[in-house]
Image: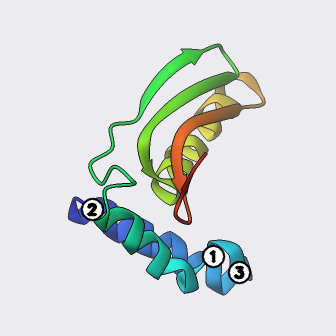
Amino acid sequence: MPEEDAVKVATLMVEASISGYGRHCVFRRRQYLARLSCGGCNPTLFISVEHRTTAAALIDCDDGPGHRAMSAARTLAIMKARTAGCGRVESKLRCYAGTRI
């Protein structure tokens, strides 16, 4: 995994822990690492926008780590909200805690 993505995922996991989101926090790091090492998650994801409207989008997360994918979705949703007054971004093909959804 590129260092920048690894730092982003680690930061988001720590933020989740501090914020009380136990299902998304550092205690799952072993599951994420196991999934990455067995090839079940794409460490070099390329996120692409598959469909977009003024206020919404669907992104393909290239079977990459869920924290990184959701960070990209959040950023895009905020940009759309600034433009349209609301924003929604759905995602597909992302890994989450060792499973693909």
**Residue at left 53%, top 83%?**
26
Q: Determine whether the residue tagged by mark 1 lies in a helix, strand or loop.
A: helix
* Labels 1 and 2: the sequence-earlier one: 2
Q: Across the whole image, how many numbered discs are drawn on residues?
A: 3
Quadrant of the rendered structure where residue 28 is?
Answer: bottom right
Query: Which residue corresponds to mark 3?
Result: 22
Crowd tier of the residue under label 1, counting other residues whose Cα lies within 10 Å: few below 14, some 14–19, many 20 or above: some
Q: Amino acid at mark 2?
A: Glu
Query: Which residue corresponds to mark 2?
Result: 4
Query: Which residue corresponds to mark 1?
Result: 16
Q: Amino acid at mark 3?
A: Gly
Q: Position of residue 101 (x, y in %)?
A: 61, 45
Residue 37 sits above or below residue 63 on the image: below
Q: Position of residue 98 (x, y in %)?
A: 52, 63
Q: Position of residue 87 (x, y in %)?
A: 72, 31
Q: CA distance from mark 1 to mark 2?
A: 18 Å
Nearest the camera: 83 or 4? 4
Residue depth check, mark 1 versus mark 3: number of the one nearer the observer: 3
**Residue at left 33%, top 37%?**
46
Quadrant of the rendered structure where residue 97 is?
Answer: bottom right
Residue 36 image label = none
Q: Amino acid at mark 1?
A: Ala
Q: Determine whether the residue tagged by mark 2 lies in a helix, strand or loop.
A: helix
- Left or right: 47 with respect to 71? left
Q: Determine whether the residue tagged by mark 3 lies in a helix, strand or loop.
A: helix
**Residue at left 64%, top 13%?**
53
Q: CA distance from mark 2 to mark 3?
A: 24 Å
Give the quarter of the figure containing the N terminus.
Answer: bottom left
- Left or right: 17 with respect to 32? right
Residue depth check, mark 2 versus mark 3: number of the one nearer the observer: 3
